[in-house]
Image: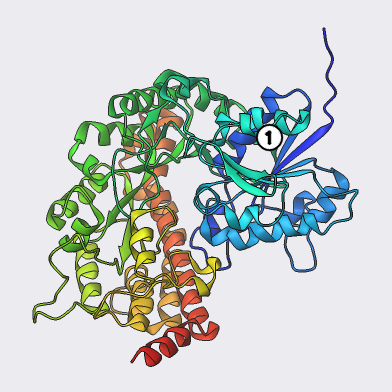
Amino acid sequence: MAVFEKQDIFRITDPKFGPNNIYRYQAGVTVSLGTVMIATVADQSLPWITTDVISENNYRRELGAPFDKNGLPDHLELQKSLPATFIGISASMTNAVPRALEIIKTYLDMPKDLQPKYFIVGGWHAGDLPEEFLNLGENVIVVHGEGEMVIALLLTALKQGIPLSYVPGISYWEDGIIRRNGPRFLAVPQEEMDYLPIPDFGLVRFAQIKFFPLQRTRGCSGKCRFCRVRTAPRFISPERFLAILQVAISQGKKRREFFFVDDRSEEDLEGFRQVLTGIILLRQNGIRLRIFTQNRLSLGEDSVTLQLMHDAGVEMAAVGCESPIPAELKAMQKPIDYPEKMVEWVRAFSRHGINVHMMLIFGYPIPPHIKEPLLDENGKPMSAKKRGRFFTSFIRKARPAYVQVLLFTPIPGTPDWKYLESQDRIRKDIGWEYFDGTHLVFIPDEGLNPVELQNEPVKLMRKFYAFRFFWMFGRFSLLLRLVRVVLVIFSIPFVWLFALPLTFRLEYGYKKWFRVTWKKPIRIFRNAIKYLQAQWIILDWRKYFKLSGFISYWDRLTDKKG
């Protein structure tokens, strides 16, 4: 039997987000599933490869991680301690692209004996705009699509000197020119979904993972203009997914919190129900799980699935409501443009004990295929403040647990990007680090003042997370939130002792008592903490926008245009 020595290192890095990315706090307790999957496929398929993952957003000094003088992960020290032959870079988030480019340049500037031989870049942004990575050097290769399809073949070709023309779905240098092999986008076919490996989170170094990402479905049947996901839905069988989940659970007691990162968990509805039923059986056997999902809003009319989600321990569902303005929904090509029905569906999630994380897009540009312009009651273009009133009214009626209002940000490769780019309305001079949903990076529609548009989403979230009549008082409102957290902490023991029926404590035994009495007080406590954290972050954003000069950028641009 042949014995292989693992002699080549394949290090995959998920770059740190820009400083104001809205997901930076969540990223600090989880890891990108895509990088873990690529690392797992390479590690399990190639006996001569040792693979590790560096998640710069979840990178811990207390675990021995080296940092440079700027407080960023020190790749020179990483390379000295474990020299990598191949460097993988995830470039999905546009906001993280500057850091991705910086990492490659850091390796290229190292002494010759430490420089890796090849760089493999993947992710949505790199796939749509590969030239900015390829122009860094002739040893850079860009993968277009789902890299599990080709990573083993690509690494083998690079190792053995096989011509890259044999590797599908990549861009690379050959004879001084950039070549691109078909297909345009690599996607794992349905018949191979069950053969994807179980993600090995043990390959991630220097990270503390609280929420473990798992994925059953890929792709989406929707065709929203702002969304980059355009592939047909494919899914892992319920039996295989439940096996993956049980492996993740068995690997440690802390692996009890999972985020199903599917674009829409219910894309295969019957399979989703089977998965939920299997999770219910696990819970009945004493395994406590916290689960977070992403779902389509219209699932609110499916009470059977919502009840299964509740019974399976789905604590929160992230739901894209996008906008309460019918004209904007029509422009986005959303399948519904009735805000009243949307309110009803959000409330249906809440009635079944599922916290709704409502995601909204503010300042959406109306494309030319929509005949009706977005006008106010006076027949004039609707201002940012008037749009904000629609959003405020909608949020108050729907009563979600959490709200995320992001400025519309064009994403490369989407129909909206192509439309705005054709009109020269995307401000690429601002820099990719600002393409994060909190900065205005395109010239808005007529009637929208850029400064008002920049400020309104932050104002909407301040209204939601602060007490209703105190949101404009800033730090004082934050103090009120802190007082509420303290009151909740002191009240929980009294709720357990006096407010709950005595039968819960005596008749069903300790485990039943714990499950019933713990759930609601802890949910109230968690929400109080999250509202405090959200309000702190929002006030921090407000301060940042005042001091950064970003508002004055649009002031100057508006004055020049005027």
Compared across the picture, whether 235 is left or right of 385 comes to right
**Viewport quadrant of the C terminus:** bottom left
Question: In this view, which residue lies farthest toward the left?
Answer: 378
The secondary element bearing badge 1 is classed as helix
Residue 508 position, x and y percent, is 37, 28
Compared across the picture, whether 178 is left or right of 406 comes to right
Taking 66 as reference, is 269 above or below it?
A: above
Q: Residue at x 76, y 31 (%)?
A: 161
Number of disc labels: 1
Residue 468 position, x and y percent, is 29, 74
Residue 286 position, x and y percent, is 47, 26
Name the residue beneath numbered marker 1: 202
Residue 377 position, x and y percent, is 9, 78
**Viewport quadrant of the N terminus:** top right
Q: Residue at x 61, y 63 (%)?
A: 98
Dividing the picture into quarters, in which one does residue 159 lie?
top right
Q: Nearer the viewer, residue 430 or 55?
A: 430
| Amino acid type assigned to the residue bearing label 1 in the image | Gly
Compared across the picture, whether 103 is left or right of 239 comes to right
Q: How many other residues sit within 10 Å of disc 1, few (<14), some (14-19) or many (≥20)?
A: few
Dividing the picture into quarters, in which one does residue 143 lie?
top right
